[in-house]
């Protein structure tokens, strides 16, 4: 099942609706990369609230999205990692340290807005 | 009492099916939500090893008992190429596929029992057990 990607101002929101197959994950990677270019997006929120498992493949792919979009000038925030899923990821040994995460969609958007504002401010103050 | 469940693993969708079956089975035994997630993640890893390295295989699930405790036994088997160096495969960070090498050593940390039997050219069988908490 394809993951819907919504455009909201300078940001994209990818809301994962159900368990992802590997094929879905790879498609999400491709779709996000295309849309970042098309909409000149500055940030992406990937909402994983609906995921009950984030195994090494899914984790690695989401991390890949974060790294690839950064190379295109857009920051990615992963939001909604469930407590049990976070526990399993740590046990599994997934390193997510170089990926931005936030509690939920609201926090994720706030983070991106803050990043964008930080860039446009002339500095000093 | 739940019956044995066998899930043929051929595509990435079968990986999702296998872990969902385990969740249903575990929930009926009263597994905590965290343990269900750990088990489902472990199954995802071993089932993906099948699709990645062997192409096809199966995941068998059954309820096991030891004294007063109950658990779920997962046997993931394939007739694939086998693992040439088990010690190396169980080392964190080692992979011959396109992964990070977290699969097998990570999976062992997610479950209570972990056994790996493999023979190059014959196949691989991984047996996992997750027990309910006393």
Image: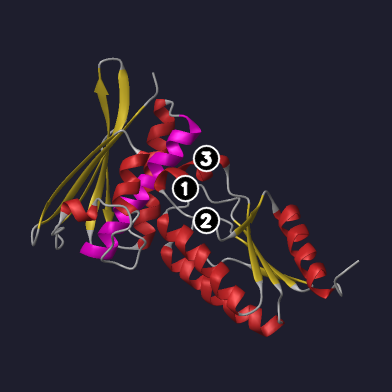
Residue B11, position as x, y percentages in the image? 32, 63
**Residue B53 within the magenta-colored segment of the rendering:** yes
Depth check, front residue: A125 or B111: A125
Q: Are marks 2 and 1 on the same chain?
A: yes
What chain letter is assigned to the residue under label 2?
A: A
Q: Are marks 2 and 1 in contact (CB under 8 Å)?
A: yes
| Whether residue B78 is situated above or below residue A72 in the rendered picture | above
Foreground pick, A65 / A125: A125
Q: Main secondary structure of the magenta part?
A: helix
Q: Nearer the viewer, residue A86 or B65?
A: A86
Residue B9 lies, in percent from the top left, at 28, 56
Q: Is residue A28 visible?
A: no
What kind of element bears circle 2?
A: loop
The residue positioned farthest toward the bottom in the image shown: A38
Q: Residues within 10 Å of mark 3 (few under 14, many from 20)?
A: some
Residue wearing tag 2: A96
* Quadrant of res A65: bottom right
Q: Which residue has dot 1 on it?
A: A89
Q: Residues within 10 Å of mark 1 (few under 14, many from 20)?
A: many
Q: Which mark is residue A84?
A: 3
- Was residue A11 drawn as part of the magenta stretch in this picture? no
Q: Looking at this rendering, what residue extends furthest in the right direction?
A: A125
What residue is at 82 percent from the left and 68 percent from the top? A117
User: Relative to residue A26, is residue B11 drawn left or right?
Assistant: left
Determine whether B94 is above or below B32 in the image. Answer: below
The stretch in magenta equals B32-54
Instruction: Give the letter of the chain under mark 1.
Output: A
Left or right of residue A23, residue A72 in this image: right
Q: Do tags 3 and 1 sit on the same chain?
A: yes
């Amino acid at each position: 099942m394809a993951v819907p990607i919504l455009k909201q101002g300078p940001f994209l929101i990818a809301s994962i609706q159900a368990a992802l197959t590997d094929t879905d994950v790879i498609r999400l990677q491709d779709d996000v990369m295309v849309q970042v270019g098309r909409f000149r997006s500055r940030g992406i929120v990937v909402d994983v609230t609906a995921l009950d498992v984030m195994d090494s493949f899914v984790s690695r792919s989401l991390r890949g999205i974060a790294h690839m979009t950064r190379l295109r000038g857009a920051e990615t925030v992963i939001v909604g990692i469930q407590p049990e899923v976070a526990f399993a990821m740590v046990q599994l040994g997934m390193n997510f340290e170089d990926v931005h995460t936030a509690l939920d969609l609201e926090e994720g958007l706030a983070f991106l807005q803050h990043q964008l504002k930080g860039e446009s401010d002339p500095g000093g103050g | 009492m739940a019956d044995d469940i066998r899930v043929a693993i051929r595509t990435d969708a079968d990986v999702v099916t296998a872990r969902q079956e385990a969740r249903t089975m575990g929930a009926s035994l009263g597994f905590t939500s965290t343990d269900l997630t750990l088990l489902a993640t472990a199954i995802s890893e071993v089932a993906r090893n099948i699709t990645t390295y062997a192409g096809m295989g199966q995941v068998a699930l059954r309820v096991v008992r030891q004294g007063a405790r109950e658990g779920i036994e997962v046997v993931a088997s394939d007739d694939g190429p086998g693992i040439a160096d088990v010690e190396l495969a169980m080392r964190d960070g080692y992979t011959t596929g396109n992964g990070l090498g977290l699969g097998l050593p990570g999976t062992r940390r997610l479950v209570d029992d972990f056994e790996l039997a493999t023979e190059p050219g014959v196949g691989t069988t991984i047996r996992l057990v997750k027990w309910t908490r006393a």
